[in-house]
Amino acid sequence: MNIMSSFKQGVKLATRTKRMILFAWFLNVLFAMVLALPALKQLDGYLRDSVMDEKVLKQLDPAWVESYRVDMEKSEYTRSLDYTIFGYAPFLNHLEMQMEGGFVRTLAGFLYDFFVRWELNPGSFSLLFFISLLYVCVNTFLAGGFVGIYSKDYRSSFPEFLMDGARYFGKFFRIALVALVVYYLFFAVVVAWINSSIYEWTQNNASETVPYSYYMIRNVVVLLLASLLFMIFDYARIRMVVDDRTSALASTAAGARFAVPRLVRTYGLYLLLTAIGVLLIAVYAILEKSIPQESYWPLVFLFIAQQLYMVARLWLKATFYASQVTMYRTISQQEHLKSVSAVPSTT
C-alpha cells in the first residue's frame, strides 16, 4: 500500500470519529484548567493591589513577567511559568533545551531515584513532572482508544472508544516507559557524543559561523532521528493492539521490525503528516499575528481560533494513528497472502 492511499484512508477514518476527537479536545481543556487555575489564583492575588491589572489584561508585558517571577521565586507554579509555552510554536523558544533532552533527562532522573534508590527527589521540576505525568496518562488513554477503534473492521461507537482506552492504557503506559529509556539513552549517548564532537571540531575556530552551522546541522539530525523513534513507538502501539501482544519490549521490537525495513513508506507517511502539522502551525501563527489583542472582541475571536486550532491538531493526531494502522494492516495482509500463495500445493 502506498503512502497516499494510507493517508486518504486515514483521513476517512478520522473523519468518522468526530465525537472521539471532540472528547479528546474536552479532556485537553480540562487538563488546561487543572494547569491554569492554581496559577491564575496566585496571579489574581498578585495583581489585585497593583496598577498593572488593566495593562496586563490588554497585552502581556515580558518585563512584568520577569518581575513577577522574581517576586514569586519561591512559588513552584512561578518557577514553571514561561508564557511562551502557550504560543503556537513553543519549540522555537526552547530549541536548545529540546535538543539537549533536558526534560527527558530530568524525568528519567526522577524515576531512577524513585524506583531504584527509593527516594522521592522531585527537585525544582516536581510540578512540571507531575503535570507532564498527567498529560502522558491522558494521551496514553486517548491513544489506546484511537488505535483500538481504527484497528477494527467495523465502525466503532463512542462507548467502545472509552473501553479501548481503558483496556490498552496499562499496555501503552508500559510502552511509554520503554520509550522514556530509549529517549534517555538517545540524548545521553548519541546527542551528547554529537555535542562533544562539535566542541572539539570548532573550539579553535575564530569564526562563530562555523559552530553555529554545525549546531544547526545537529538540530536537523536530532529531529530526524527523534521523529524516527516516535514513529517506531507508534507502530509498537499498533502491533500491541492488532497482534494482541502483551510485552512492551516485544511490541517495540516488532514495531521496529515493521517500520525500519519499509522506511520509505512508513517514514514517508510520517513526514507527510508532520508537514501538515507544520502547515497548521504556520496558518495559525499568521492568523494570531494579524489579530489585534488590545480589545475584548478580538480576544474572543482569537480564543475561538485557538480552540479550533487545538481541534485541528487533535484531528491530525487521530489521522496519524488511522493512517499508520491502515498501512500496517494492509501491508501485513498483503504479505500474508503472498506467503500463502508461495506455499506449494500438496495435492
Image (cartoon, grey):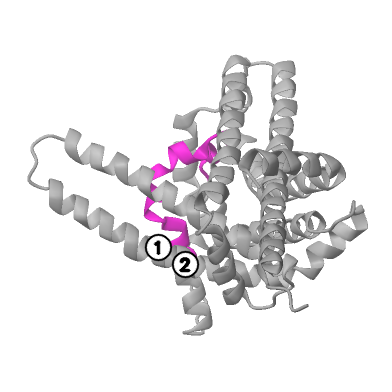
Query: Residue at 20% of width from left, 41% of height from top?
Result: 211
Magenta span: predominant SS is: helix
Label 1 sits on a secondary structure element that is: helix
Q: Is residue 80 left or right of residue 140?
A: left
Task: Compare residues 97 and 76 and report the one nearer the observer.
Answer: 97
Does 245 sit above or below residue 70?
A: below
Q: Is residue 122 visible?
A: no
Query: Residue at 66% of width from left, 61% of height from top?
Result: 335
- In magenta segment, residue 85: yes
Amino acid bearing label 1? Phe
Q: Residue furthest bottom?
A: 117
Query: Residue at 68% of width from left, 16% of height from top?
Result: 295
Q: Which residues are magenta?
A: 81-107
Q: Position of residue 205 (x, y in %)?
A: 9, 41
Amino acid bearing label 2? Val
Question: What residue is disc 1 on?
Answer: 186
Does 4 sit above or below residue 134?
A: above
Question: What residue is disc 2 on?
Answer: 182
